[in-house]
Amino acid sequence: MTTGRSRPRYVPTVVLVGVLCAATATACGSSASSGSVEANEPKTTWEEPASYAYTLTSTTQVLAGTFRVKVGDGRVTEAVGVDADSRRQVRELPGEVPTIGGLLRRLEKARSEDADTAEADYAADGRPVRISLDWDKNAIDDEALYVISSYEPNPG
């Protein structure tokens, strides 16, 4: 009878230890990868053309809103705010609206500085369509999200 009682205690203990080991491995594995820079994330093969247009939706401490951007000779030649806040920002901070190449440089800088998050999603042609940055996951107001849409190479 004693043998019968100790056996049920033994099985749950083994199961509990197994579950704890699995949970610890999963937690350790996910904490190392979630929110961290993806070291193996491929760099884009897209080459920024000299002239293009795109829409940028930005959520950062400095630049927030939606902007229609024209680029010529590798520089922003026109930035138009789509909403009231972005129109105000274009008036007050005209040089803050970046080219797509500028956004890629911010991404690379975040990666080289070991930011907690430096991720990008790419279109089939290799250009970025979404860039997410967070230098320190424990700090507030250092996150940045850039969504790139309505891309038109060499607009006429």
Image (cartoon, rainbow, N blue to C red):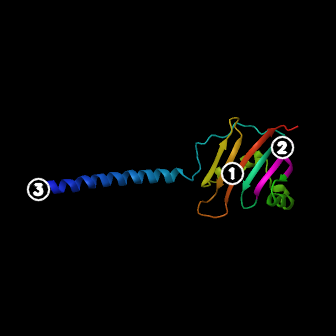
Of tags 3 and 2, the one toward the viewer is 3
Q: Residue at x 71, y 35 (%)?
A: 125
Q: Do residues under tags 3 and 2 come within 8 Å of each other at their CB atoms?
A: no
Residue 85, image x and y in percent? 80, 60
Q: Nearer the viewer, mark 1 or mark 3?
A: 3
The reply to whether the magenta stretch includes residue 75 is: yes
| Residue under the point 75% across and 37% down | 47
Q: Which residue is under mark 2?
A: 74
Q: Position of residue 77 (x, y in %)?
A: 88, 48
Residue 66 inside the magenta-drawn segment: yes
Residue 61: percent from the left, percent from the top?
A: 72, 61
Give the x, y percent position of residue 48.
77, 39
Sequence-wise, which precedes: disc 1 or disc 3?
3
Kindly report the secondary structure that dominates the magenta region of the rendered protein: strand
For numbered disc 2, what is the local secondary structure? loop
Q: Nearer the viewer, residue 19 or 95?
A: 19
**Segment tinted magenta in the rendering:** 63-79
Mark 1 closeness class: few <14, some 14–19, many ≥20 residues within 10 Å: few
Q: Earlier in the sequence, mark 3 or mark 2?
A: 3
Relative to 88, is 50 above or below?
above
- Residue shown at the point (42%, 51%) measured from the top left: 25
Q: Which mark is residue 109?
A: 1
The reply, left or right, for residue 1 in relation to residue 130 is left
Mark 1–mark 3 Cα distance, whole angstroms, equals 68 Å
Q: Amino acid at mark 1?
A: Lys
Q: Secondary structure at mark 1?
A: helix
Q: Amino acid at mark 3?
A: Met
* Residue carrying label 3: 1
Q: Look at label 2 and name its amino acid.
A: Gly
Residue 113, quarter of the rendered image: bottom right
